[in-house]
Amino acid sequence: MIKKTCGDSGGLNAHGEPCGQTKDLAPENGLCSYHDPNRSEAARERSRRAADEWHEAVLDAKGAREAPPPPRSFADVTRSYAWLSWAVQNKVIPPAAANSSRASLREFERTLRIEERLRELEAALRKAGVKL
């Protein structure tokens, strides 16, 4: 006997193929809880909660909670770069997330350099007697 699947009743996966779920099919329409319009929002919420719990457990297990605080100085930027490298190597965060964070850190670093240069220029102007 071949088991009935959600796909037999029209449920499709993300690739547009018939859903292969065989458990928890609704007796009235044969769809799994994810594809059944009467139950899909509750199923998505359960899935979101489970993913959040899994994510929290991974963060705890892999030491991701040790991420440095938001940077405020060049030293903080360096510390953040080092943590991102560690986090990718240890599969705490995906490389794409690290690349996005590195781009933000580079922008912050540029801003720090501009602020530093402005302070130098202001000091030179004050030394020359210009009131700011």
Image (cartoon, grey):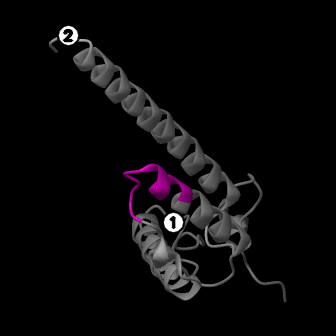
Instruction: Tell whether label 1 touches label 2 (CB within 8 Å).
Output: no
Mark 1 residue element: loop
**92 and 28: which is toward the camera:** 92
Three-letter amino acid code at the position of disc 1: Asp
Horizontal and vertical percent position of residue 79 = 53, 62
Question: Mark 1 — residue?
Answer: 36
Q: Which mark is residue 130?
A: 2
**Residue 18 vs residue 122, the one in the foreground:** 122
User: Closer to the camera, 35 or 101?
Assistant: 101
Of the two numbered discs 2 and 1 on the same chain, state the one appearing first in sequence: 1
Q: Residue 49, located in which quarter of the rendered image? A: bottom left
Q: In the drawing, does residue 43 fall left or right of residue 8?
A: left
| Quadrant in which residue 90 is drawn | bottom right
Observer-side mark, 2 or 1, equals 2
How far apart are labels 2 and 1 at the CA level?
73 Å
**Residue at (55% x, 50% y) in the render:** 101
Where in the figure is residue 7, as x and y percent of width and height?
71, 65
Q: Which residues are magenta?
A: 69-78
Rendered-image quadrant of the N terminus: bottom right
Residue type pointed to by label 2:
Val
Position of residue 87 measured from the top left corner of the image (x, y, whole percent):
63, 69
